[in-house]
């Protein structure tokens, strides 16, 4: 929030800023009030001045992070005129000992006119294996570093929106990487980052359980959901299935960026269906590579794929997980193939072996809706939560409550 008693609002590249006036002093910007979990964070601030001559070594501002309504100070940093000579980006590290409602503030002394950006955010500290903090500039949007990276330039506003929601954007080896929830992802197309909001802001797959679990990710896409599951302490392993070669390669590359999680993930370069198939399938070449269907389209581009009958393939994996005391959860998002997958699971008597389903279903076939999938689940003793809209694709969740 901007304190308009101390300055005038400005908009720069779509971002709200305050240009303070010489003389008045006090908190020029404060908030946002952000709910954080326990952990180490970096808060980023941008403060600059276009005055031709600043008073030497004078205190111009104080930036801080607080909680408990401003009563508990978590971090504080003074900004003097000499600091502005080195740039406008300031990073403040802080630690939240437990869940807290953090506030980011900038107090100004009134000794000079300052331009203060209102978009402040905190990102989790990423540490290397030796415990050292890596890339402390995660708290800042890499405006200058990204200027020579085509993907960054073409999608700057999209990346900026992610950053403003607390996602670190890095420029590494001439490419873009995003860090969200401790997970590092390549940014080579919008499809790489398209599902960040669905998973981390809408919490589409954010289950919790107090027992060790095996997750089967049917439709791995570029690996974001598999990584999201693997970072959960209660998840012992993730079996992820993806038939499309380019998408599979991108998932493998994302998984490799996260060595602390990769050991949990077992990628399978096949799609699941109600039959075994090896051969060409026509796909729409205008689709993003992470959102294609194995159902096939007319007049598309041929891609060589391998599909496997879901029941016979999953049965030994599920039995092995149960034999090791693991609960079994299926996440299913496979662009229309969910109907074939469910038919095979039911035919092979596997519904009763699975504790929960997290499903995005697709309205692609006459006479088939989410009810086609939900009816056998209710009969098998599942409690269902249907979030589907009246028209189009939808989500549902189902948890087995009858043993």
Image (cartoon, rainbow, N blue to C red):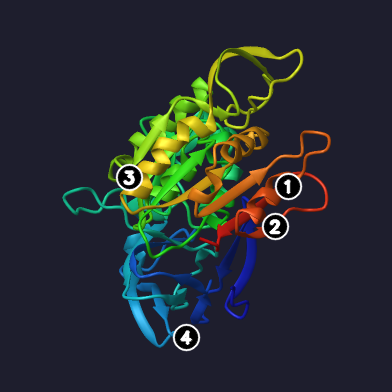
Marks 1 and 3: which is nearer the front? Answer: 1
Element type where label 4 sits in the image: loop
Pointer 1 with pointer 4, Cβ within 8 A: no
Pointer 1 with pointer 2, Cβ within 8 A: yes
Q: Nearer the viewer, residue 97 or 355?
A: 355
Task: Find the distance from the CA under tag 2 to the CA under tag 3.
Answer: 31 Å
Q: Earlier in the sequence, mark 1 or mark 4?
A: 4
- Evaluate whether residue 228 shows in this view: yes
Marks 2 and 3: which is nearer the front? Answer: 2
Give residue 261's mark: 3
Task: Find the distance from the CA under tag 1 to the CA under tag 4.
Answer: 46 Å
Element type where label 2 sits in the image: strand
* Residue neighbourhood size for the residue with mark 3, other residues' Cα within 10 Å, grouped as few (<14), some (14–19), many (≥20): some
Task: Find the distance from the CA under tag 3 to the CA under tag 4.
Answer: 36 Å
Q: Identify the residue under disc 2.
A: 386
Q: Nearer the viewer, residue 356 or 375?
A: 375
Pointer 4 with pointer 2, Cβ within 8 A: no
């Amino acid at each position: 929030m901007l304190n308009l008693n101390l300055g005038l609002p400005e908009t720069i590249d779509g971002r709200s800023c305050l240009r303070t006036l010489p003389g008045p002093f006090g908190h020029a910007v404060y908030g946002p009030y952000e709910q954080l979990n326990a952990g180490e964070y970096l808060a980023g601030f941008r403060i600059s001045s276009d005055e031709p001559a600043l008073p030497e070594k004078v205190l111009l501002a104080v930036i801080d992070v607080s909680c408990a309504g401003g009563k508990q100070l978590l971090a504080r940093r003074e900004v003097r005129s000499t600091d502005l000579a080195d740039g406008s980006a300031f990073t403040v590290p802080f630690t939240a000992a437990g869940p807290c409602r953090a506030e980011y503030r900038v107090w100004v002394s009134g000794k000079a006119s300052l331009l203060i950006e209102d978009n402040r955010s905190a990102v989790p500290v990423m540490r290397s294996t030796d415990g050292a903090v890596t890339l402390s500039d995660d708290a800042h949007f890499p405006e200058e570093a990204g200027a020579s990276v085509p993907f960054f330039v073409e999608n700057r506003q999209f990346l900026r929106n992610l950053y403003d929601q607390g996602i670190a954007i890095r420029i590494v080896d001439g490419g873009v990487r995003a860090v969200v929830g401790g997970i590092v992802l390549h940014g080579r197309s919008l499809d790489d980052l398209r599902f960040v909001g669905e998973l981390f802001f809408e919490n589409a797959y954010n289950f919790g359980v107090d027992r060790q679990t095996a997750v089967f990710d049917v439709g791995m896409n570029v690996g974001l959901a598999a990584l999201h599951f693997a970072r959960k302490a209660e998840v012992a392993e993730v079996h992820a299935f993806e038939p499309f070669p380019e998408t599979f390669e991108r998932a493998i590359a994302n998984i490799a960026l996260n060595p602390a999680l990769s050991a949990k993930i077992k990628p399978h370069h096949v799609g699941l269906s109600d039959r075994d198939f090896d051969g060409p399938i026509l796909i729409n070449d205008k689709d993003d590579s992470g959102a294609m269907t194995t159902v096939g389209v007319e007049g598309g581009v041929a891609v060589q794929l391998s599909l496997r009958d879901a029941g016979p393939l999953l049965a030994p994996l599920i039995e092995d997980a149960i034999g090791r005391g693991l609960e079994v959860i299926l996440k299913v998002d496979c662009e229309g193939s969910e109907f074939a997958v469910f038919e095979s699971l039911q035919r092979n008597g596997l519904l009763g072996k699975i504790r929960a389903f997290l499903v995005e279903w697709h309205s692609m076939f006459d006479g088939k809706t989410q009810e086609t999938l939900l009816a056998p689940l209710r009969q098998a003793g599942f409690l269902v939560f249907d979030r589907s809209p009246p028209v189009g694709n939808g989500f549902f969740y189902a948890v087995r409550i009858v043993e």
